[in-house]
Image (spheres, rainbow, N blue to C red):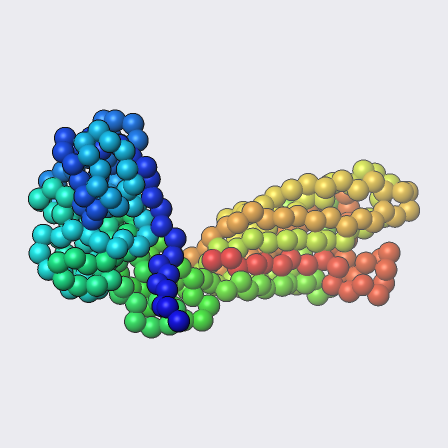
Amino acid sequence: MTAVNAFGRQVIDYLTNKSGGGVIAGDVVVIDTSNDQAFTTNTAGAFTGGVGVAQETIANNAAGRVLRFGYAALVNVNASVTRGQYGKTHTVAKQATGSASRTIGTFCQFLTGGTSPTATLFPVDLLGTSLSNPMTTTGDIIYSSDGSGTPARLGVGTAAQVLVGGTLPAWGTVTALTYTSAAASADSSIPNTSTYTDVTGCTASLGAGTYIAWVTVDCSTASANALFVHLKVINSTDTVEYAVDRYTLNGTGVSGEDTFSLVVPAFTIAGTKTVKLQAASNVAFTVLRRTTGLNANTTDSSRIVFLRVA
């Protein structure tokens, strides 16, 4: 049986020689950007444009086959090369020269050594040496440690950490979301006065942090007059108001009842503070209820919930 060598797919262009002289099989040529569908030769070492290898003798101004990618049966070199080395254009026209590693301008890898090597051609390397891999451990991340793109290693973070920005990427810990709930412990009678009254039980001691809050109250009155209920969330330690709003309830002549809600935008406190819900009304006999009169089985209907977000 006769052995058959299969070298895979070759990409060959049919180009016109505009070098000013003839070339032979194995000569290294470059794409001529001054003429259509043409090649030329040059003496630029490590040329980074389009590079090919002539596959036959091609006279000046004649057209012929030029290998661009794939297996080359011959690459003409300036001196003996070693199998496995890489090739780049030499400072002598039509020749390649060997390189121990891929670097800027390398366009092939030699499959055999000597002065008449075979090779496989690939697109010209433009970025120089390959990336130096700084990773050592599972989960490592590569990032640029300076403006020139020097690779650096960031080791894997611990559980619950997240990647944060800054001068350099780093692992940071996010504050876990926690909440504090303060429910009404008894019905609170709100007098007919402009003075705000604490809603019994709706007081919480909060540590330093940033919070948002939700307020729900159940209100009833025996008055037939239009009722206005004012709710306030206040830091009683520093006398700082975080939210104030007004709600309307119409009496029926005997009684009236409704449920109101208030969302408190994000606020930040330093140190431990007492934050409470207060209320005021324009009508006497207004009650903020612990249980909903419309459903006596619903307890703690009036409450304030604080969610710590940072």
Residue shown at 27%/33% (left/top)? 63
Horizontal side of 310 relative to 256 (left or right) equals: left
**Residue 257, visible in the rendered structure:** yes
244 w.r.t. 71: above or below? above
Horizontal side of 9 relative to 118 (left or right) equals: right
Residue that protrudes farthest toward the front in the picture: 1
Residue 38 position, x and y percent, is 26, 32
**Residue 127, visible in the rendered structure:** no
Residue shown at 23%/58% (left/top)? 118
Residue shown at 56%/47% (left/top)? 265
Q: Nearer the viewer, residue 67 or 249?
A: 67
Residue shown at 47%/52% (left/top)? 268
Residue 40 position, x and y percent, is 19, 35
280 w.r.t. 300: above or below? above
| Quadrant holding the N terminus | bottom left
Q: Nearer the viewer, residue 112 or 127?
A: 112
Residue 291 position, x and y percent, is 79, 61
Residue 204 position, x and y percent, is 57, 62
139 w.r.t. 278: above or below? below
Q: Nearer the viewer, residue 152 or 217?
A: 152
| Total numbered badges shown on the rendered structure | 0
Quarter of the figure with residue 193: top right
Residue that protrudes farthest toward the top in the picture: 35
Q: Nearer the viewer, residue 257 or 18?
A: 18
